[in-house]
Amino acid sequence: MKTREFLGRHGHWLAPPAGALLAAAFAPASLAPLAVLCPAILFLLWDGATPRAAAWRGFLFTCATFLAGTYWIYHSVHLIGQAPVWIALLLMVGLAAIMGSYTAALGYAVARWGPAQGTWRWLVLLPAGWVLVEWFRGWFLSGFPWLALGYSQLATPLRGLAPVAGVYGVSLGVALLAGALVALVLGRRADRIAAAVSAVAVVATGVALVQVEWTRPRGTELTVALVQGAVPQSMKWAPGQREKTLALYAGLTEAHFGSDIIVWPEAALPALERDLREFLDDLHATARARGSDLIMGLLRRDPATGEFYNAMAAFAATEQWYYKRRLVPFGEFFPVPATVRDWMRLMNLPYSDFAAGAADQAPLEAGGETLAPTICYEDAYASEQLALARRASLLVNVTNDAWFGDSTAPHQHLDISRMRSLETGRPMLRATNDGVTALIAHDGTLLGTLPQFQPGVLTGTVAPREGSTPYMRFGNWPVLALSLLAVALGLTWPRRRAPPREAR
């Protein structure tokens, strides 16, 4: 009773620090237990709260999580992009507020229609509702699938759930542990028994699934070289920089011709592909003559449509192109009228008017293997990558995280890429402009990385894989269906109710 009264008095003040602390569960701090503890605190703050109070606490909690976890938006927009401070703050705070509104809706619904306490609330309704919120915010209005709880568990036994149910399946396991923790604190004897059994079952299932090899090696290993130019974003498009960048990448690559696959990062060269044709043709010829296939990120104006694309090219037996499908809102395109774009030009807000690539593009062929490509943050949209991953033996991601400097963003993004390998049972070749360039194994472990902000080449061998994980076959549908059913049962099942206490 004292715990409930304390939370009722101080809930509004406790929600923001608990939410901010959750950001430390993710890379680079990677304090995985916080992913259980912090949501458990929010569940405690929702206990007995009025719908209005629960909504406000949920908003404050998640708003603080995203302010602490994605502060690098300010760095990107103002410090690198040179936009006015007020615009950078507006975008950063606006995103956090939108993310917070989703958790506010969950808190309101649970307080308004859910059971006041007990197993159905803590072990069914709250974990399932949390996962549905993560999924919804990951696609609605283009979506922002960052800071899902599952990304914090790459070093824990719960990672074993990823090949079966994806990142949201891992999130469900984490949220269930959070609910179990609340039940152990507030529940009656039956609730505590159910919580202990549920927690042991989740962890034991993860431990068992970690041992399963869902895919198998295909053919022989390939030699790869991932090139990191480490050109600062502030210098990339400076006058006279183009020739220096071309010479830098050519020089870094020269000693590694003969590797089966060489990868350059996103938009590696500061020019349109059409303005680099002689350089690219010579590079392609040299690579082929010396037994290498080359993959690189380039900016391209499609000769057939005239549209500009953020693209990836594979210079192999043939020249192939992949166009980025998921563009960054307010970065690569502006979902606003042309008059507003003109105003944003005047305000010096950086952007490009790229077109999105088609949804049904073919994978790339290089090194005798089929590769599923992604450019930058589109690898955060897990289910959208499955169609290509099912046809591929390797994943390849090219990224330019130079926009975020020495912040947490590149480390968070690396863990997102690791999760994609874990979900699909496919190794990933990940080349970035200034870090974190990495060779990722099929189980999400790191085979090698390069130091950030230093030019270099990461070399290694990788074993292409074949076969399918359950997640590759079914995607997010099983965990979403289970969560929807759990929410329906949690809201409608006969239960003990108590009048909410007045939030103070």
Image: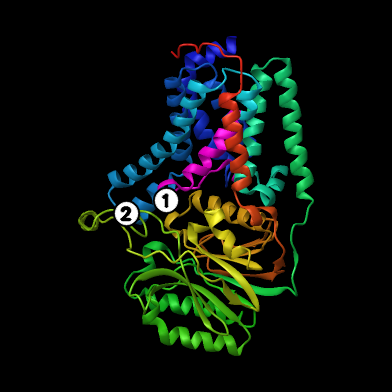
Asked whether 446 or 442 is in front, the reply is 442
Which residue is label 2 attached to?
Answer: 335
Image: 28 above or below 274: above
Which residue is disc 1 drawn over? 142
Residue 334 coordinates in the image, percent (x, y): 32, 56
Protein image colouring: rainbow
Q: In this view, does 340 lie above or below 107?
A: below
Query: Does residue 261 lie above or below 46 as drawn?
Result: below
CA separation, marks 2 and 1? 10 Å
Quadrant (top left, top right, bottom left, bottom right) of the C terminus: top left
The residue located at (46%, 17%) in the rendering is 50
Secondary structure beneath disc 2? loop
Q: Position of residue 372 (x, y in %)?
A: 58, 67
Tag 2–tag 1 contact (CB < 8 Å): yes
Q: Which residue is drawn at 66% across and 26% down?
A: 181
Along the line of sight, the residue nearer the viewer: 247 or 333: 333
Query: Given the image, on which type of amino acid does mark 1 rest?
Result: Ser
Would residue 364 appear left or right of 344 to someone viewing this image? right
Q: Give the range drawn in magenta.
A: 125-151
Magenta highlight: main SS: helix
Picture disc at residue 455: none
Q: Earlier in the sequence, mark 2 or mark 1?
A: 1
Magenta segment: does it hold 262?
no
Quadrant for the N terminus, please.
top right
| Element type at mark 1 | helix
Is residue 451 something that shows in the picture? no
